[in-house]
Image (tube, rainbow, N blue to C red):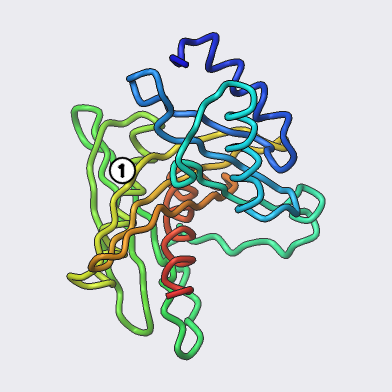
Amino acid sequence: MGLDPWGLRRIEKLLLNLDGVGSLKIVPDGHGGIEEIHVLSSSPLGPKQIVRNIESALLAEFGLQIDHRKISIARVRAPEIEAAAPPETPHTKADTAPAPARTGDRRLVLGNVRIERAAGQKVTCRVDLSHDDTVFTGEAEGPDFEKARMEVAATAALEAAQQAGGDSLSLALQGIESVGAFGHSFVLASVNGTVKRESASLAGVVRVRDSVEEAAVLACLQAVNRWIGCR
């Protein structure tokens, strides 16, 4: 089935009625198929079950088969759970010190996110990540509009994370979107990670609090740290 606008809306309507799908974005591949499906969920269902539900629904309703690796599930806390959670510490202020990592913890910690505007409607973003006592700084530049600023911030974050991982680690931004769900705005990041011959499609989602740029950095960091943490 070719994905014309009407066909895409039919698929979106079907998937939004599935258990575990709170919000989603479908990325066509330009050849009548689906390149990626990104889902936000606050359901207690596990990500694998949600993926299986999507695969089964597409096959039963449209005869459409899709590789499970093209479906990414990002979990968000339900609003009532999030409201009861302790507030997060802001990360963008220059005088905010990174929280120390636990002994043996391989995860990276966000230090600063700095956005500088330049002539020609350009922005530069610098992101500091730390592990133990070492700070890694990534930098990227791009146009000064919201979607591009999210991409610039995410790229800078992944550059810093790649420095921390060494030559064997490769990180590439697959896509980033700002989406609305459960009455809030979220940034969803999709990252491809490769270490030697092992490759993984990673996803992170963070609620927008101070800025979409900070949320983009945190979403990438969430995706990468989950992968690092289980290796």
Q: Does 85 sit left or right of 127 as displayed?
A: right
Between 229 and 19, the residue placed more toward the observer is 19
On screen, residue 79 above or below 28: below
On screen, residue 91 above or below 20: below
State which quarter of the image contains the C terminus.
bottom left
Between 51 and 77, the residue placed more toward the observer is 51
Q: Secondary structure at mark 1?
A: helix
Q: Residue furthest bottom?
A: 103
The residue shown at (27%, 67%) is 195
The residue shown at (29%, 45%) is 116
> Are there few (<14), some (14-19), or many (20+) residues within 10 Å of tag 1?
many
Residue 62: percent from left, percent from top: 58, 21
- Residue type at mark 1: give it: Val
Q: Does 95 sit left or right of 29 as displayed?
A: right
Residue 169: percent from left, percent from top: 25, 66
The residue shown at (56%, 50%) is 206
Between 120 and 139, the residue placed more toward the observer is 139
Residue 148: percent from left, percent from top: 33, 34
Residue 137: percent from left, percent from top: 26, 64
Q: Does 72 sit left or right of 125 as displayed?
A: right
Between 137 and 206, the residue placed more toward the observer is 206
Q: Which residue is mark 1?
A: 152
Q: Residue 31, located in which quarter of the rendered image?
A: top left
Q: How many marks?
A: 1
